[in-house]
Amino acid sequence: MTGALKLRFNRKQLCIPYVAFLVLFVICPLLVVVYYAFTSGTGSITIENFVNFFTNTNTLGTLLYSIAISVVTTAVCLVIAYPVAYVLARSRLKKKYVLLMLFVLPMWINFTLRITALKEILSSIEGNLSAYPFLNTVTGMTYDFLPFMILPLYTSLSKLDKSLTEAAEDLGANGFTVFMRVILPLSVPGIISGVTMVLLPSMTNYVVLDMLYNSTYIMGSLIGSYFAAYDWHGGSMISLILLIIIFVITLATNRFSDDETSGRAML
Amino acid sequence: MKIAKKVIAAAWLVLVLAFIYIPILLLAVYSFTDAVMVGGAVDGFSLHNYATLFRNEELRDMITGTVLLAVGSALIATVLGTLGAIGAFYSRKTAKGLINYANQIPVVNADVVTGFSVCVLLIVVIGIKKETFVPLVAGHVVLCSPFVYLSVLPRLRQMDNSLYEAALDLGATPAQALFKVVLPQLLPGIISGFMLAVTLSLDDYFITTYTKPSTFDTISTYVVNATKGGQTDIKTALWALSTIIFLIVVVAVVLMNVLSGKKRASEERI
């Protein structure tokens, strides 16, 4: 009996538990969220949730504020991280891997503890944290997400074929032209995956704002407040809007994507 | 000109490192004092923050709870993700593509949305009690297993397929071939997937808040609540926690580098 079972054992079937898990705990929750987003508390189908979101100046303001925070944070991270990744990738140091580790090591420390550290410093400098909410939030987000920008940039810059830059130099291009015409275009996959890794979390990570006493809402805070009020329909509606934003970003960046530089998988 | 460039480059690296490390290191220094705020009055060296951290039952429970949750969910995620990757790798192209897409959802999704959706399905719709820890563990496994899957898959691609066939030809049952031939080859991917899962779970705030029992706290949710409260004792004890975690991370990274360096050296010798 068991012999027959063993014979029919097939490697493909090993994925059944994981597929079942994905369906049950990833796909089903999202379907429920979509259903809840289009229903009201009484169970009738409605698009009222969305109409309210897009006609209310408060919620639209939240959307705009989230976009402002995330775009500025991403830009700041990119400006800080690109030179770091560039210098590290091109350095001839034997132990440059150790140096890279130094830059990404904070990633493994719990982010709430890191933000606590930053908060203590900022409040000893500024006195009253609530005086500069936007600046503090961008600083906090940058502090939190910088490693996620450095890593993909480093990966894509260190893979860059040195002979290409040498060829450009031999053909008479100066340093600036080589950078603009050769290095920068070739590092686009790294830039894209770094940007996607910072853009989205900085739109939703409202803990950074909370901890730095910024009382303005971002998209994530809306889900938090609907959750606190047991308003599953409102929370689902915001989740669906975020899902659409994520989907659009993923589609837009997919054609640039590069397996090896993408995602938190490189941690 | 060249030297100027090098100086600017080095200065930039130092500046960014200062930005990264000054807060953590300053907090570490202050964790050894009586001060109640960074920059505040310092009354000399003191270990009372560390004493509080180890004596306070609430803090101790919170830390053990966080670690148990991380290791437990990482173990489940590692088994699921590894089996999923092996199964998907040998499946037909369409099935494989579909699994890859589904696997990618939690990776690109915002943690807030993942946590909220798991909460709505398991707690609101199905009605599982938060106190059973089922929603919490399920949420953490959702967060972690895709990354295990992603770190095992490249190993499968690198693996020599004929080894499995050879094992079967030599009389091994498929299960034996799997455990004795395939799994050992995937081990580095499985281990790094597991480590990744542990770190992701330790760092999570959002999935935890939406699915945890009200009396249970992880480091993240505890820290966020503590910063809102006025208990300076707890607040400064968390500085000590931050310092200890920092030291653990430094030691772990150094060890990892030494080990992989040795491995690389021995491989080069061969």
Image: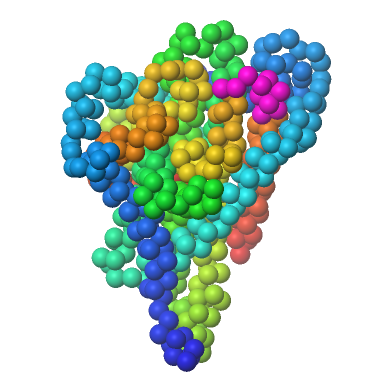
Q: Residue B179: where, in percent of width, then height?
A: 54, 75
Image quadrant assignment for residue B216: top right
The residue closer to the viewer here, A170 or A211, is A211
Q: Position of residue A120 (x, y in %)?
A: 60, 18
Q: Over which residues does the magenta segment extend?
A: B228-239
Residue A57 within the segment the image draws in magenta: no
Q: Nearer the viewer, residue A176 or B228?
A: B228
In this rendering, is residue B250 above or below A20?
A: above
Of B139 and A144, nearer the camera is B139
Residue B10 visible in the snapshot: no
Instruction: Indicate the quadrant where residue A164 lies.
Output: top left
Q: Residue at x 79, y 31 (%)?
A: B51
- Most frequent secondary structure within the magenta stretch: helix
Q: Is residue B229 magenta?
A: yes
Q: Quadrant of the C terminus of chain B?
A: bottom right
Place residue A182 in its image quadrant: top left
Lateral position of residue B37 relative to residue A232, left or right: right
Total numbered labels: 0
Q: Is residue A95 left or right of residue A27?
A: right
Q: Is residue B112 above or below residue B68?
A: above
Residue shown at the point (59%, 40%) measured from the top left: B215
Residue for point 51% across, 63% down: B79
Q: Which color scheme is applied? A: rainbow
Point 65% across, 52% down: residue? B259
